[in-house]
Image (cartoon, rainbow, N blue to C red):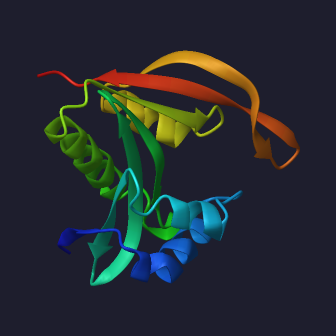
């Protein structure tokens, strides 16, 4: 099946929030997601089979970017769609002349950490107890990628 990307817009909020809830055990609030559509953020939605199946959101300040959020429907993981989203977001950041990209990921999310490492991200630090977890708090791994020119 082919895929394409559409820029996020406020008219997509209902579908984006449904994706957010389906993809994350502790999703962003609808209000937080809405605040990241436009106004200094870049986001694109991955359309696959005619339906939105994931998205990413980045923010760039001066030459430093942050991957704020990225998600793929759980039932479609492991098919390379996350890689398409991640590489698309990094291509866009490179076009914006960002010099590096940071992200935070749950320490227990081995699949995501593997994806980020495959793209060249390196761990920098750990934030203890950063995320809400099923049985208490979970650490966040802070990772960085230098975007080569």
Q: In which quarter of the image is residue 10?
A: bottom left
The residue lying toward the viewer, choosing from 75 and 147, is: 147
Q: Quadrant of residue 77?
A: bottom left
At which x and y percent is residue 22? Answer: 59, 70
Which residue is rendered at x = 30% and y = 32% of the image?
119
On screen, 112 above or below 53? Answer: above
On screen, 69 above or below 43? Answer: above
At which x and y percent is residue 34? Answer: 53, 67
Residue with the most extreme top position: 124
At which x and y percent is residue 148? Answer: 17, 21
Residue with the most extreme left position: 149
Q: Quadrant of residue 55?
A: bottom left
The residue lying toward the viewer, choosing from 84 and 31, is: 31
On screen, 61 above or below 147? Answer: below
On the picture, is 55 further left or further right than 129? left
Residue with the most extreme right position: 135
Which residue is rendered at x = 56% and y = 73% of the image?
17
């Amino acid at each position: 099946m082919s895929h394409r990307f559409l820029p996020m817009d406020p008219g997509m909020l209902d579908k984006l929030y449904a994706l957010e809830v389906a993809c994350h055990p502790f999703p962003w609030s609808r209000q937080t997601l809405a605040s990241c559509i436009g106004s200094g953020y870049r986001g694109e939605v991955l359309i696959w089979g005619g339906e939105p199946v994931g998205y990413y959101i980045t923010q760039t300040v001066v030459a430093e970017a942050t991957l704020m959020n990225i998600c793929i429907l759980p039932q479609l993981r492991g098919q390379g769609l996350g890689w398409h989203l991640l590489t698309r977001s990094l291509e866009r950041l490179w076009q914006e002349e960002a010099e590096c990209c940071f992200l935070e990921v749950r320490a227990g999310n081995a699949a995501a950490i593997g994806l980020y490492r495959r793209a060249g991200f390196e761990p920098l630090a750990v934030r203890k107890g950063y995320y809400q977890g099923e049985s208490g708090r979970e650490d966040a791994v802070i990772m960085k990628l230098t975007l080569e020119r």
